[in-house]
Amino acid sequence: MLELEELVMDFSGFKAVNGCSFRVEKGSITGLIGPNGAGKTTLFNLIAGALQPTNGRIRFLGEDVTPLASHQLFHKGLVRTFQIPHEFHKLTALENLMVVPPSQPGERLFSNWFAWGSVRVSESDVEKRAYETLEFLELSHVAHEPAGNLSGGQKKLLELGRTMMTDAKLVLLDEPAAGVNRTLLRKLEAKIDILNKERGYTFILIEHDMEMIEKLCAPVVCMAEGQVLIQGDFQTVRSNPQVLEAYLGE
Ligand code: ADP
């Protein structure tokens, strides 16, 4: 589904990503791990089109998408979750899923959430889908609560929900477990698992919570110093001496 070829991101002489290559298979949940500063976030920014690589190539569904910006990738089904913006905290959970697209171009984030392919949808369809999404995420009871009142875990579920309002094929999750309590963490894992197994979403997730990585991810890609150190199943990666050394040096 996704192919990264020798990606390089050079920040004025410092290569945060330095020749990174790997493939993401359709239907997988790929875990991206590595010590702080390994280049994981920069790599996500490259994949999501938020940064242009200095060198290398990105293919998505067989197409060279290297020069495309995030909104263009979004329309192709490559979606990255975003924290709920501060201004959205006053909107209810339901409204956060239903934000109406502006007619003028420019406010990409807003229009993105409603661009289901090239089909324009009516508000009632959007509302129906938003309610279904809340039900799937077990958030129906907070549908009319301002998003700012939700717990950290509920916000993460809502962020996941926003990707479900689109026709996402590949979803990039940036530390979904961060700041989430144990109970909601299990729920979040279960929802990611269902979206993957039953609804065909492919995921790449950056995560420090090794329990989540072990439960959900195959393969696991470990980065260090801008490069892929090793990839494989969780046990192989975890027991690799170079991986241990990279984390010890953190
Ligand atoms: P990780 O997500 O694995 O912790 P990052 O991708 O955030 O790693 O950072 C990798 C390295 O690139 C770090 O040393 C960081 O300081 C550096 N870096 C990230 N963004 C920039 C930038 N815009 N300009 C210069 N250096 C950056």
Image (cartoon, rainbow, N blue to C red):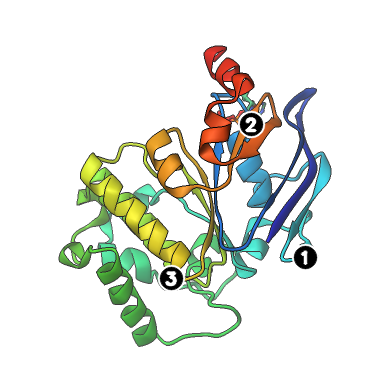
N-terminal-most mark, 3 or 1: 1
Q: Residues within 10 Å of mark 2 (few under 14, many from 20)?
A: many
Secondary structure under the numbered disc 2 in the rendered image: strand
Q: Would residue 107 be seen by someone viewing this image from the given angle?
A: no
Residue 46: percent from left, percent from top: 68, 45
Can you say which quadrant of the picture contains the N terminus?
bottom right
The crowd level at tag 1 (other Cα within 10 Å; few <14, some 14-19, many 20+) is few
Residue 62 circle label:
1
The answer, for residue 200, to whether it is visible in the render is yes
Q: Which residue is mark 2?
A: 223
Q: Residue at x 58, y 46 (%)?
A: 219
> Three-letter amino acid code at disc 2?
Met
User: In the image, ligand 1 is in what quadrant?
Assistant: top right
> Position of 27 compared to 182: left or right?
right
Position above or below: 160 against 124: above
Q: Nearer the viewer, residue 3 or 98?
A: 3
Instruction: Give the foreground label among 2 and 3.
Output: 3
- Percent x, y of residue 131: 28, 75
Q: Is residue 68 above or below residue 10?
A: below
Q: CA distance from mark 3 to mark 1?
A: 24 Å
**Dot 1 or dot 2, earlier in sequence:** 1
Q: CA distance from mark 1 to mark 2?
A: 24 Å
- Amino acid identity at mark 1: Gly
Quarter of the image where one finds residue 175 = top left
**Residue name at image x 54 percent, y 48 percent:** 218
Q: Is mark 2 within 8 Å of ligand 1?
A: yes
Residue 179: quadrant of the picture: top left
